[in-house]
Amino acid sequence: MDGIIGELSRRDKRKLERFIRSCKDGRLKTCYLIIVNLAEGRSASDTARALKVSRSTAYRVATRFSEQGLEGLIDQREANGELKLDDAYLSTLWEVVESCPLDYGWRRPTWTREMLVETLLKRTGVRIHVSTMSVALAKIGARRGRPKPIVESTWSKRAKNQRLREIQELV
């Protein structure tokens, strides 16, 4: 057994190289490249340096490959549970963001992420982290920005109409 994972058969190397060429997921592609490099006899340190990953990542990928084969390299988070940012949550967030915080009993006129988390907890029963709220806001296309002030004209209606007539005459 040379190196960490041992030697791969020619068939397995070709299979891995085919996977690398067709892989669209960057994380999975990096895992495949780690295995190919280790199978060619490179050390975990050299492999990690060449692929710009940590040494512990190279060892972790090699261990999972040794124990579970190629299936061990696939992202195993699909069994993490239900998504919190589903369509219903995002549509509720959109409704809340379009309204004023004063409508929900808050004492300030602009939303903060913390206020949105608490308001949506009351409306949906789902608690998310403040950083996850940032992701949700990006998903619905909300932008960060200063509120646009609404300034009433100080001119009387008569003065405003007179000025508008003067401008129309010039045009």
Image (tube, rainbow, N blue to C red):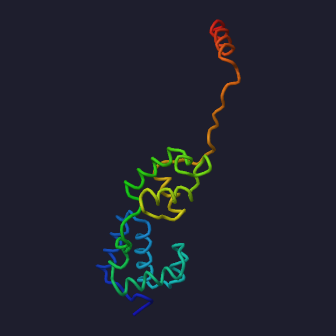
Residue at the extreme top: 169
Q: Is residue 73 left or right of residue 128?
A: left
Residue 21 quadrant: bottom left
The x, y position of residue 61, in whole percent, is: 43, 81
Give the left or right position of residue 101, taking residue 10 as reference: right
Q: Is residue 35 above or below residue 169?
A: below
What residue is rendered at 51% in x and 44% in y? 99
Q: Does 155 sit above or below residue 99? A: above
Quarter where residue 23 is shown: bottom left
Residue at horizontal 44 percent and vertical 77 percent from the top: 34
Place of residue 156 in the rendered image (x, y in percent of width and height, measured from the top left)? 68, 18
Quarter of the image where one finds residue 5: bottom left
Task: Tell me what residue is drawn at x 46 percent, y 64 percent.
Answer: 127
Nearer to us in this view, 47 or 110: 110
Count of picture labels = 0
The location of residue 76, given as percent across then percent down, is 37, 75
Q: Residue at 38% of width from left, 64% of height from top?
A: 83
Front position in the image: 121 or 46: 121
- In the picture, the quarter occupied by the C terminus is top right
Q: Is residue 35 above or below residue 107?
A: below
Q: Position of residue 138 (x, y in %)?
A: 50, 53
In which quadrant of the rendered image does the N terminus lie? Answer: bottom left
Name the outermost residue toward the left: 11
In the drawing, does residue 154 fall left or right of residue 10? right
Q: Residue furthest bottom?
A: 1
